[in-house]
Amino acid sequence: MSFLRMEDLDLEAKRVLIREDFNVPVDAGTVTSDKRIVAALPTVRLALEKGAAVILMSHLGRPVEGEFDPKFSMKPVAECLSGHLGIEVRLQPDWLDGMDVEPGQVVLVENVRFNPGEKKNDEALAKRMAALCDIFVMDAFGTAHRAQASTEGVGHFAPVACAGPLLAGELRALSKALDHPERPMLAIVGGAKVSTKLTVLEALLDRTDQLIVGGGIANTFVAATGHEVGQSLYEPDLIGEAQKLIRLAHQKGGEIPIPKDLKVAKEFSPDAPSFVRRLDEVQPDEKILDIGPLTAMDYADMIWNAGTVLWNGPVGVFEFPNFAAGTRSVAEAIGKSRAFSIAGGGDTLAAIDQFDVAGGVSYISTGGGAFLEYVEGKTLPAVAMLERRAAEHRS
Ligand code: ADP
Ligand code: MG
């Protein structure tokens, strides 16, 4: 991957337009989790230190495109940024025709999705954004898989387009885990449905030495090997696909392990009592909601012996205390293991928080959808744009 990097450019007295991912939860006009804002602070501080006039942009939520809606205003983000940076971050409601911003100042423009044409990557809109700056910085990994006006289009028309430190760091970690992994490389793919992760599973089977499936996905594999899954969440239509993946793993000399024990409940509820069952003991009226203790030990062992671990998706319904142990054990093993570990996915990040293991994970990817598309081996449109601009720059 070869693109220009913000760190390497002269930003002195330049107007620098930075696309961040400030899509944060907001309740009653205040930001309730500022993780994404905090993650972007080093980029903003570096631009200021380099003498730039900084213009920040992001989307927030899913407003009806083209309509101002105070519910999706960036105002709470501007306030949160001001607090962290210790300088006023001005919110700019109308911004496509330009604005005053001096070196050392930071302006946050209003939600990019209030502009018609943002999602369609409208060229005229992208040009108006590009006209605001001398340098465009793409720093929002979480939106890099979408070709929209503020993520991709703008980069084609800005005088210079480069990657910000957050985006570049994310790509570096992903490339380290996937393209040059320390062996053996283990992937754990859990979560609710095989159907949403089929291409990820196929891609990972190719690239990894070991693949563990978990959660509702594992239930489909349990059924695919001829075992009772009772009332569990699973996908009968995908049993054939699961069998194909099991065969492919065997052809490679490996296997996709099937849990040897499971935790089940009679109903899907937060305080449903749990029972441990051997793989061949699940009853027709039971739901599999977690792996059992022996399986948890096996998986922790595999994590312990891996050189690289990639984790997406919980291995059980970790939101329910009685069914959190499997995911806790995976999270803690990753946290303690010396393997280079990378984790991504909305619920996976929630589990990492819940079990307080963030400090032991080598890299936590901020982009759910973008993370999975990268793992699938797809080219992220915003990254392709940065590479193309860099190639033009060199010639
Ligand atoms: P991520 O957001 O990390 O990619 P997913 O959205 O694919 O993960 O899956 C997370 C959801 O899967 C969680 O809400 C969890 O409760 C659910 N889940 C995990 N195991 C099971 C199971 N055995 N039965 C039903 N749901 C499950
Ligand atoms: Mg999810």
Image (cartoon, rainbow, N blue to C red):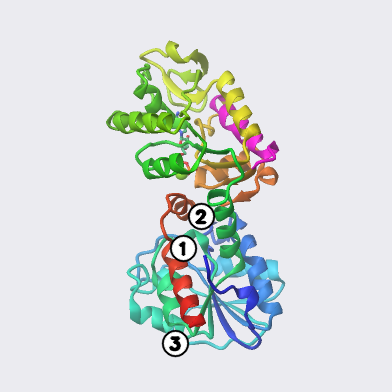
Asked if residue 68 can be seen in this view, the reply is no
Q: What amino acid type is highlighted by mark number 3?
A: Asp
Given residues 188 and 248, the one toward you in this image is 248
Q: How far from the left and from the top, in percent, is residue 109?
A: 51, 76
Q: Which residues are magenta?
A: 322-339
Question: Quick check: marks 3 and 1 in contact, CB under 8 Å?
Answer: no
* Residue count near mark 3 (Cα–Cα under 10 Å), binned few <14, some 14–19, many ≥20: few
Mark 3 or 2, which is nearer the eye? 2
**Which mark is first along the chain, 1 or 2?**
1
Mark toward the start of the polypeptide (3 vs 1): 3
The alpha-carbon separation of the residues under discs 3 and 1 comes to: 25 Å
| Real-space Cα separation, disc 2 to disc 1, in angstroms | 9 Å
Q: Nearer the viewer, residue 101 or 123?
A: 123
Name the image quarter holding residue 62: bottom left
Gap between marks 3 and 2, in whole Å? Answer: 31 Å
Residue 366, x across and y down, in percent: 55, 54
Which residue corresponds to mark 1? Answer: 144
